[in-house]
Amino acid sequence: MNEIIFECKNLSKSYGLKPALKNINFNLKRGKIVGLLGPNGSGKTTLIKIANELLTPTSGEILIDGKNPGVDTKKIVSYLPDCISLPDWMNIRELITFYKGFYENFKEDKAYEMTKNLGIDVEAKLKTLSKGNKEKVQLILTMSRKADLYLLDEPMGGVDPATRDYILNTIIANYNENSTVVISTHLIADVEKVLDEVIFINNGEVVLQKTVDDIRSNNGMSVDALFREVFKC
Amino acid sequence: MKWNFDNERAIYSQIVEQIKLFIISGYYEKGSKLPSVRDLAEEAKVNPNTMQKALAELERQGLIYSNRTTGNFITDDENLIKNVKKEFADDKIREFISYMKNLGYDKQDTVKLLENYETGGNENE
């Protein structure tokens, strides 16, 4: 088991001639909750998709527990995509069984507990749920795995503030020293107290990697305020 | 009592301050057991590592002590708690005096106002 759970080495990705990621280098240790923060179109989703082998890098690489994304890393990475990617004709009970069949580290009890806490009817078909409730289901399935690395792409974009609190509590309650949670978001004020460190990404480049308390002590402002300053339009 | 955080200062130092306040106000009784790091983090909605760092600082200052098998406990050293209480009171008074100075009251005026406030406010009009 490597102490570094996630590493980008000279990672670049272009869509045709358009660069999306430009020579990205950073690493993340185990036992951290990290914010991947950047404006729309900065490259957050591209980075996370490469980590899940949904895209391949143009050059450079991502290492997860020392390995390139593939079958082995998918066992230890729990991924929340930025759009609903589940078979929507299944009901929630069927989806839970579906996930249980896919992933050894899936905790069924936890999934049922979370559906109950979030008021999701397990007999309802996914396609009959509202957009926000579909997102909750996807999040429940993602967080019910006992993974080494959670990659959450905009976990809170479409849900109400009470659910955001629940999600953050779930992340805190789930915390253990072996696993790292990466939260990609632009809802910074909501998450910053929960984060160890943040990575600011802009135009495909990492512009800052710092702990939240360093930002607050050195800059005398919240991460949210710093973000507004760095990315002022 | 509730956890409150401002947006300017490091979160860990704000946690240290709040737990001190919980101790000196008696909300956390002296000698009692603290909730686990995870429960405290959940309650305050902060990162567990940050909570751990704050508890380590409180331990360094002697306000809590940890027992490897049974968890963290509040000190039962009454003098230490009294000293921290005095520090908090001094800080508030300093803040208050300087605020009153900005309003144009010197220390003597301020003390007079305070006394009147305590005895009902307007009997010395």
Image: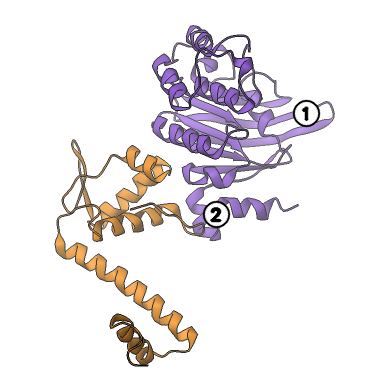
Residue at the top extreme, as displayed: A101
First along the sequence among labels 2 and 1: 1
Q: In which quarter of the image is residue A36?
A: top right
In the depicted structure, whether residue B19 falls above or below residue A177: below
Name the quadrant of the N terminus of chain A: top left
Query: Which residue lies under the disc numbered 1?
Result: A14
Q: Nearer the viewer, residue B121 or A181?
A: B121
Query: Which residue lies under the disc numbered 2?
Result: A222
Instruction: Give the letter of the orange chain.
Output: B
Residue visible at 44% across and 36% down? Answer: A169
Distance from label 2 to label 1 (Cα)? Answer: 33 Å
Image x and y of residue A68, in percent: 59, 20
In the depicted structure, whether residue B43 falls above or below residue A100: below
Q: Nearer the viewer, residue A92 or A82?
A: A92
In the depicted structure, whether residue A9 falls above or below residue B78: above
Circle 1 packing at 10 Å, graded few (<14), some (14-19), many (20+), is: some
Q: What element carries label 1?
A: strand
Instruction: Determine the chain carrying the residue at label 1.
Output: A
Instruction: Give the letter of the purple chain.
Output: A
Residue A46 left/right relative to A72: right
Image x and y of residue A5, in percent: 49, 28
**Coloring basis for residues:** by chain
Residue visible at 74% across and 25% down? Answer: A58
Residue visible at 49% across and 6% down? Answer: A101
Image x and y of residue B115, in percent: 30, 85
Q: Amino acid type of disc 2?
A: Ser
